[in-house]
Image (cartoon, rainbow, N blue to C red):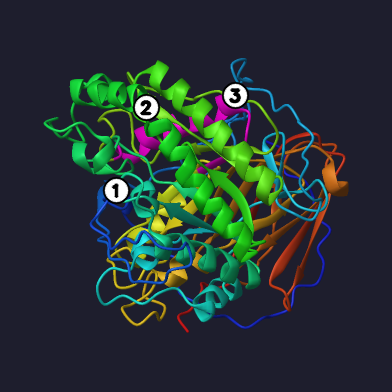
Amino acid sequence: MFDTACRPRGIRSAPIGGLALLAALGLLAAGCEDGSTMSADRGPPDARSDVGSTDPAEDAALDAGDMLSMDGAPDMAADGALVADAAPDPAAAACPVIPSPRAPDGLRVAGCRLVRDGEAAVWPRVVVVSGDSLLRAAATPWHEPAHWADLARAGVDVVWMPVLWSGIEPAPGTYNGAYTARLCQSARQAGEAGLGVVLALTQHRFGPALGGHGMPEWVTPPGLSPIAVDDPRGPAHPSLSAAWRAFWDGDAPAALTAAWGRLIDACALEEAPGIIGISALGAPHGSADDRARFAALADGIERDAEARLGPLLRFEHGLWVDGALRWTERDGPDRIRVVPGWGPARWPGAATAARGWRSTERDAARLAGRPLWLVEVGGQGPDAMNGALSDAEAAGLVPAVWQDGFGSPYGLRDEDGRPAATWAPALSRPRPALLAGRILAWRADDAGLTLRWFADGSDQGLSRLDLAGRLPGEARLDGGPAVDWFTDYDPASGLLAVFVEGAVGVVELTVPFVEPMQSP
């Protein structure tokens, strides 16, 4: 390890606000809509009748653990120090850069990084807008413009907006115009607040008839047994095999394509420019052939959406099969891979213990060759929320926070739509705002932050860290004898600028905080 010298700039004091991030056991929440009963209409797509839904969530405990690296970078020891003799990983995936057709000022993919404007990587803040706010569970409010503005002011960049096929088409040929209108109106309002929107199919264990989420019950043959979350047969379960045979043998593929087309047409008419991404694939549990065929179906749906809405970010969901994470390969620009929130020990079930879970996520990351998101990460209460998000961040994954809902144990808001106790730990978090290279690992707590990245000279070596109101102490950079660097803190913006010159390789920055975050 080589300790470089720092040319310090002046650090002035700044107001402290927000809630302290606490080290504790984390909970990983995988919450999905369950295909509940909804009111439907056969009328025009602009109908506005109420729609009802419930919104259960599964949870599992995660233990706090040390920081783990990925992508063949040096390992991080338990005390946070670099292990200098860690060898490069020959199996680590390359990061091919496919030119993006998206506008330069929009979020887009460049190799394994997400970028906007220049070539510096961005670490977007993503929140899942839960189905209870879209399908309207009893006594919960809709998301209104003020709610989207709350998220934008909190620094959220992207909202992940679940889409239920059963919401669009609750019965064969019966379309719920109120549901599609509400989704598109929400997408427009979120975009007007400055948020990007990803429309994402909810898909897990086929559908509610088999104990999962996604496919409408009318698509599933009657008489099949539900699948337990820890059933060892996993994708080979006979009920799942029978459901997929019926799906492919019938009119379901054409019906799903038509349902998505109806939604995209409605959003195009709503003029919702905030839509920046689409995930029509979901996580289709099934055989390799079923997953490949469904991926091809999703590709067609997404191409049709791009023809109406312009170039979009597109998402691929991983799936644990026989203890390994499998990806459905899909080529093209602006692809992001979504790591499932369930470990390999149980299919798909609760996450494994923290170290095993994070190790598998790290292995997935080094083999991915694309940016990685972990969708639906949350916890019941501030400590659990902080623990779950910290584990995801430590593996270098972009967490999509579960959930911006109302009154749920996992919700960021109370029943009246005001910020709940989990709001600050989820959204008032330090993060790399811009990074001149590829992120490898990240950790932040009350004591300070540690960031490791592969510096590649992009953006003239300039990175910016959002300290979320914390005051930085004297920084330290570990890299090599040829590294020249300095930091500069701007109290007005709360950003710490980090300039690294002459470094091409793995570097690690450690910044202590002068004093912890205080509650408002």
> Magenta stretch: residue 96 in it?
no
> Which residue in the protein does label 2 denote?
320
What amino acid does circle 1 point to? Ala
Q: Nearer the viewer, residue 414 or 426?
A: 414
> Which residue in the protein does label 1 denote?
171
Q: Earlier in the sequence, mark 3 or mark 2?
A: 3
Is residue 484 in view?
Answer: no
Q: Earlier in the sequence, mark 1 or mark 3?
A: 3
Q: Nearer the viewer, residue 382 or 133?
A: 133
Label placed on residue 511: none
Rendering quarter of residue 414: bottom left
In the displayed image of the protein, which residue is found farthest to the front?
43
Q: Nearer the viewer, mark 2 or mark 1?
A: 1
Which residue is at 19% across, 32% downward?
Answer: 230
Q: Secondary structure at mark 2?
A: strand
> Which residue in the protein does label 3 denote?
86
> Is 352 placed above or below 344 here?
below
What amino acid does circle 3 point to? Ala
Spatial CA distance of label 1 from label 3 is 56 Å
- For the record, the magenta segment spans 351-373
Prevailing secondary structure class for the magenta stretch in the rendered image: helix
> Is 122 placed above or below 97 here?
below
Q: Earlier in the sequence, mark 2 or mark 1?
A: 1
Residue 57 position in % (x across, y down): 27, 54
> Magenta stretch: residue 355 in it?
yes
Q: Nearer the viewer, residue 309 or 287?
A: 309
